[in-house]
Image (cartoon, rainbow, N blue to C red):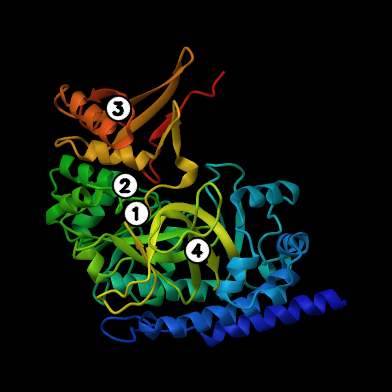
Amino acid sequence: MTHAANRADETRIHWKRVLEATLDERSVPFSADYWSEKDSWSRDRTRAVQDEKIRAVAPFLYENSAFYRRRFDRLGVAPSDLTSVESLIANWPVVTKQEMMEDALAHPPYGTYTTCGQKEWEDRGWMLFSSSGSTGVPRVFRYTHFDRRFWEQANARALHSGGIRKGDSAIPMVGFGPHVFAWGVQYTMAAMSLPVIPGGGLDGPARANLIDRFKPTVLVCTPSYAFYLGRVMQDMGLDPAASSIRWMITGGEPFSGVAGTMEKLQGLWDATAVEFYGCTEASPHCGGYSCPEYQSGAQNFIHLMDDIQVWETVDAETLAVTPRGQKGLSVCTNLTSESSAQLRFLVGDYTTLSDEPCACGRNHTKAMGCMTGRSDDLINLRGIKFFPVQIEEAVRAVPGTGDEFQIHLRKDGDLDVMTVTVEHTDPAAAEAVAREIRSRCEVRSAVQVVAPNALPKSQMKAKRVFDERTRA
C-alpha cells in the first residue's frame, strides 16, 4: 500500500472514530422532551464538539477527496490551518454548486467532491442520491450504512421534537426515487420502531382510501402534495380534517416561512405540520426541524442541529459572512458523514440566524422566518428581483384562491412580462391578486383566473415557474 493510501485510510479511521464518539444511537427517547441529550447541550459544549470535528475532518477530506485536495492546494491552505469554526470561516471560502457541477462534468459519473469511493461503496454502500439538477448538472452522492446510522438519529431527533411518539404510524406519499427526504423518514421510522404503511406507486384516490381504511396518524409528503391529497379526499366525499392524520412531515419545498401557506395547509387537515429542512449535498438528513414553540405559532422559525453541522449566512453578492440577525444565504458545514462531509457549502436559502435560546430548551441556532427562497430561484423581471414565495404570499392573501398557481415569464417584444395564473370562483379576484403582487414585489403582473382545480396538482415538488424568455 502506498504512503498516500495509508494516509487516506488513517484519516478515515480517525474521522469515523471521532464521529462514533459523539453518536447517541438509540431506539427510545432520552427523555420526554428530547430524543438525544445533545438537544439540550450548552452552546459551549456544542462548539467544542464542532471544533473537534473540524480538526478531524479537514485532513480526512484532503486525503480522501481529490476535489478538496485541489482546493486546499489552490488556496494555499493546509488541513492543519482549520482547527475551529473561527479558523474555518477565516481561511475557507464557500464552496458553490458551480464548483461541484464543474467537477461532476470533469469526473463523471460521481465527481470527486465526495469521500465514498468504489471500495467503500462495494464494502458498505447504502444508497445513491442526486440533486434535482434544476440549476445545472445533477450532483450524485453515494452514502454508506455508516452514514445511515447518523442520518436516522438526526431525523429521530427532529421527529421527536415535532411530536411524533410511540403509537403513531406513518404513510409516506412518495414514489421513492432518489428523494433524500422520504428515504430518510422511512429508515428513521424503522429505527424508532414506528410502523409505516407504504403509499408509493399509488394514485391520489388509492392513497386517500389507505388513510380512510387504516387510520395512519402521520402523513409524509411535500406541502404541495398534501394540498392535492386533501382536495382528492374532499372530491371523494371524505373530510381530511376529520381523518386520522394528526401530523404532516413536510419537506422538499419552502412553506412554513410563506405567509398563509402553513395556516391554509394545517386548516385543510386539522393537523400539525412538522418542518424538515436539508439538502442532498451537505445535509441529507434533517438539518432544520420544528419544535413545540414553533408549532405554538408564537414565532416562525426552525432549529438547526449545531452539534452535527455549522450553519452560517453570507451576503448574496460578496459571499462575506453576515452577522447574526441579518438576512443572508445559508451555508452549511456538514460534520456527520463518511461520504459527504462538506466545508462551507453554499446551500443558498435566504434566512436570518439567531442564537437566542428557545423556550423548548434547545440551544441550537434558529433560522428565523424559516427558509424562504433559494437564491437559484430568484426572478429578475425588468430589473426588479423577487422570489416565487413572494408571489405565493400574494396569492394566499386573497380569500378563496385555490391551492395551486403558476408564474409565466415571456417576452413581449423587448419587454419581459409576467402572468400569474390562479384558481378562483370569481374572475374579479384577478385585480386583488395583482394588487397584492404589486405590494410585495413592486412589479406589475397580469393575473389570469381559472376555475378551481383547473391547474395540475403536484405529486412531488411543485413546478410553478415557467420561464419562456430564453426560448428561440
User: Which is more toward the observer, 56 or 440?
Assistant: 440
The amino acid beneath tag 4 is Ser
Position of residue 450 relative to residue 288, above or below, is: above
Question: Residue at the location (56% across, 79% down)?
Answer: 51
Earlier in the chain: of badge 4 and badge 2, it is 2
Question: For mark 4, does the 10 Å Cα neighbourhood hold few (<14), some (14 to 19), or many (20 or more) residues?
Answer: many
Q: Could you say which quadrant of the image residue 300 lies in?
A: bottom left
Q: Amino acid at mark 3?
A: Thr
Q: Which residue is mark 4?
A: 283
Viewer-nearest of discs 3 and 2: 3
What residue does disc 3 label? 421
Mark number, residue 221: 1
If the image is split into quadrants, where does the N terminus sit?
Answer: bottom right
| Mark 1, other Cα within 10 Å: few <14 / some 14–19 / many ≥20 | many
Mark 1: which amino acid? Cys
Q: Which residue is mark 2?
A: 225
Question: SS for tag 2?
Answer: helix
Q: Quadrant of the C terminus?
A: top right
**Which one is nearer the viewer's eye here, 327 or 161?**
327
N-terminal label among 1 and 4: 1
Inter-mark Cα distance, 4 to 2: 23 Å
Relative height, residue 90 to residue 109 (above, below): below
